[in-house]
Image (spheres, rainbow, N blue to C red):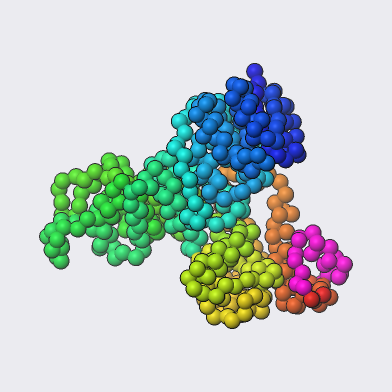
Amino acid sequence: MGATILVADDDRAIRTVLNQALARLGHEVRLTGSAATLWRWIADGEGDLVITDVIMPDENGLDLIPRIKKLRPELRVIVMSAQNTLLTAVKATERGAFEYLPKPFDLRELISVVERALSAPISTPADDEDVEDEQLPLIGRSPAMQEIYRAIARLMGTDLSVLITGESGTGKELVARALHDFGKRRSGPFVAINMAAIPRELIESELFGHERGAFTGATNRSAGRFEQAKGGTLFLDEIGDMPFEAQTRLLRVLQEGEYTAVGGRAPIRADSRIIAATHRDLSQLIRQGIFREDLFYRLNVAPIRIPPLRERTADIPALVRHFAAQAAKEGLPAKVIDDAAMERLRGYRWPGNVRELENLVRRLAALYSQEVIGVDVIETELASAPAAVAAEAADDEGLGAAVERHINDYFVAHKGTMPATGLYDRILREVERPLIVATLVATRGNQIRAAHVLGLNRNTLRKKIRELDIPIVRGLK
């Protein structure tokens, strides 16, 4: 038999779509655009499942969840929101929501979540705890970042080992800190160690500590990072650079939950959550025999992939504003990036990822007197950036090879979850938009010259500018 599902959303179109989709599955659907009406239904004992928006005219949907859980702890709540930030995902999870879905949502995914919610065992919600926006370590509302927010929200109440992968500069440590700061070990220490920065002969001592006299120069007992992280989180950065012999000792800790200090005999109980990160391909290191496969599986219990900035260029304006505001708080002049300059930033490949963007924004604040930064300044900075110079070698491979590498990266990133349809048009759009933007920037917005360079009719170029939503610099043709 179908369930009774209560849907609260002030958007009539969304209510209609959900009503049709859920009714086709045999469920009875009750619809409202009011939080007060939703609460009245719940208080009257109606409904087997709640689907609610966050922002409604009379009340915030997140504020309803603790009251729902107190009155009817068995009633599961699915939260939808266009406020697609980490804070929304965290608050929804902390207040006891079964799942959080960012808008716009995939209807098939929502139906899958509804089916899980109706069949899943009842769990006890976590205590409510407010988190301020300024504490959030992650910026961006792109679909890629939404997946990361949801992963953090799901994992923050567990002690599962997490393996974070991603290119250098993508923010792997920020994700690790978010897992700690919003997790159940938040009151304990967050201890980080970079495997690539520690001499190989000192790795074991750094991790597990050493007793006095354990080796030449060991004049006193020293606590290792495992001991320092007791009750908290141990972040093993660049785990792919860990020496093989140290990998063996780490594996034993993960298997047995205890370790011994270098030169010691008494076992010490390990009491920290392990989060590891790497920019390297561990599967390739395993094939080369320099990384243990069994350690990989112990660490990779919950994998999180951080996308490079070029895969989430929609987040660049928000990141720029965030870094500019940070720079202003530190005493640097406030800066504004104009539309054409922002579009150029979105078209850049960002080999240094978010770290490169942050450094650029700080440099703009420190070195340039004008309050509004234009595209000429951005072109100069990107041309002279160390990361851009390093990227020139990759550009020598030719456009065809670069596109092929990008497509291969796409299929590797989506291994096991092949795209549905429309990949051909999607790749064309991804190439076409930056090509037109770069040409317009090079011709200073002159559409006649840009059309000539591109080999397009001027009307065709104008049509593509409209279709691709490319902003036009004021005062230029």
Question: Which image quadrant is residue 269 in?
Answer: top left
Between 306 and 337, which is closer to the camera in this rendering?
Answer: 337
- The residue segment tinted magenta is 455-474
Residue at 67 percent across and 71 percent down: it is 338
Residue at 55 percent across and 46 percent down: it is 88
Question: Which image quadrant is residue 471 in?
Answer: bottom right
Number of numbered discs visible in the structure rendering: 0
Between 196 and 186, which is closer to the camera in this rendering?
Answer: 186
Residue 464 covered by magenta stretch: yes
Residue at 67 percent across and 75 percent down: it is 375
Is residue 72 shown above or below 382?
A: above
Q: Is residue 49 left or right of residue 234?
A: right
Residue 139 covered by magenta stretch: no
Is residue 57 shown above or below 175?
A: above
Residue at 87 percent across and 67 percent down: it is 459
User: Could you tell me if residue 331 is visible in this image?
Assistant: yes
Is residue 59 shown above or below 263?
A: above
Residue 434: % across, % down: 70, 66
Q: Residue furthest top?
A: 1
Is residue 445 shown above or below 142?
A: below
Question: Which image quadrant is residue 221 in?
Answer: bottom left
Which image quarter is the N terminus in?
top right
Q: Is residue 339 left or right of residue 176?
A: right
Which image quarter is the C terminus in?
bottom right
Residue 281: % across, % down: 46, 56
User: Could you tell me if residue 398 is visible in this image?
Assistant: no
Residue 222: % across, % down: 19, 58
Residue 187: % across, % down: 35, 47
Between 413 and 53, which is closer to the camera in this rendering?
Answer: 53
